[in-house]
Image: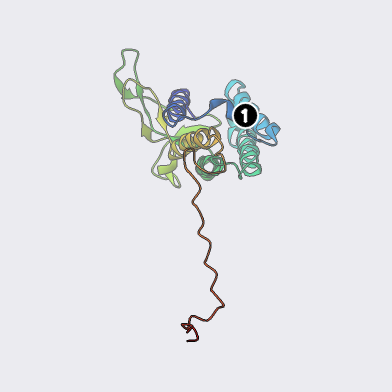
């Protein structure tokens, strides 16, 4: 997920919580397990961004480490799948992992902005995670082919958008206030009518002796 998409996702999730009158403090009370899986997966991906992998090892060592990081992050999502939002997030991550796994890198559109903000064709240098898109890509439509409008200099994947939707869903359901049980305020309990007892006496008229 790109930096701009992360910022936009956090902004959208915040708006969702405010508009729906959620309680942001409840997010800190969410029961989330196995955080080490998430941190380990993200640590590997961050390291791959800053550590130079030799070009002859990008499709071997680099590819293996990248797929391992996705496996860790997906495992974290599945452990917490009972929490609303993690299912959608896991689906988005799986889409990204699928297209990367099939093509040994994320097919990326060669589009960007120059220093004046003009849209230009921007060459994509092959890295551990990204590679230039081509007509031979498998499921290439799942790659980074969605271009954000100007002035954003970002390309996204369908998986990125699904992850953003999942984060908003997590923010919505994670900030819901529990409903109170009982009768509504101001409502009076209905009076229950007791059934009349049937008379055992005879209803036939009685005559007095003359």
Q: Nearer the viewer, residue 78 or 191?
A: 191
Residue 108 in which image quadrant: top left
- Residue 117 placement, left or right of 198: left
Residue 99 position in % (x across, y down): 50, 43
In the picture, residue 141 is in which quadrant? top left
Q: Is residue 15 visible?
A: yes
Apparent side of residue 30 relative to residue 147 in the rendered image (left or right): right
Tell me residue 132's x, y (percent).
43, 33
Circle 1 Cα neighbour tier, 10 Å, few/some/many (<14 / 14–19 / ≥20): some
Residue at figure coordinates x 41%, y 29% from the top left:
19
Q: Position of residue 122 (x, y in %)?
A: 37, 24
Q: Tell me: residue 176, above or below residue 210.
A: above
Task: Look at mark 1 in the image and give the residue it sits on.
Answer: 42
Toward which corner of the image does residue 28 lie, by quadrant?
Answer: top right
Q: Is residue 54 visible?
A: no
Q: How is the image coloured?
A: rainbow
In this rendering, position of residue 92 left or right of residue 60:
left
Give SS at disc 1.
helix
Question: What percent of the width, then of the height, locates residue 197?
Answer: 55, 69
Which of the two residues, 163 or 102, is positioned nearer the viewer here? 163
The residue most toward the bottom is 210
Label count reads 1
Seen from the viewer's position, the closer of residues 76 and 152 is 76
Q: Nearer the viewer, residue 69 or 3?
A: 3
């Amino acid at each position: 997920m790109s930096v701009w998409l992360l910022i936009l996702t956090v902004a959208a999730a915040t708006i969702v919580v405010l508009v729906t009158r959620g309680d942001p403090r409840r997010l800190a009370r969410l029961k989330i397990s196995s955080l080490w899986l998430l941190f380990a997966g993200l640590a590997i991906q961050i390291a791959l961004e800053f550590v130079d992998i030799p070009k002859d090892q990008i499709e071997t060592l680099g590819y293996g480490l990248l797929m391992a990081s996705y496996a860790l992050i997906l495992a974290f999502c599945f452990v917490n799948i009972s929490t609303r939002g993690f299912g959608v997030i896991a689906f988005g991550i799986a889409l990204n992992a699928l297209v990367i796994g099939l093509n040994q890198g994320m097919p990326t559109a060669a589009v960007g902005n120059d220093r004046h903000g003009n849209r230009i064709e921007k060459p994509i240098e092959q890295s551990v995670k990204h590679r230039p898109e081509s007509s031979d890509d498998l499921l290439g439509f799942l790659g980074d082919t969605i271009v954000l409008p100007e002035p954003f200099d970002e390309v996204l994947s369908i998986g990125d958008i699904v992850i953003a939707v999942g984060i908003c869903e997590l923010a919505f359901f994670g900030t819901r206030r529990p409903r109170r049980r009982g009768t509504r305020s101001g409502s009076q309990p209905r009076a229950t009518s007791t059934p009349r007892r049937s008379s055992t006496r005879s209803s036939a008229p009685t005559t007095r002796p003359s």
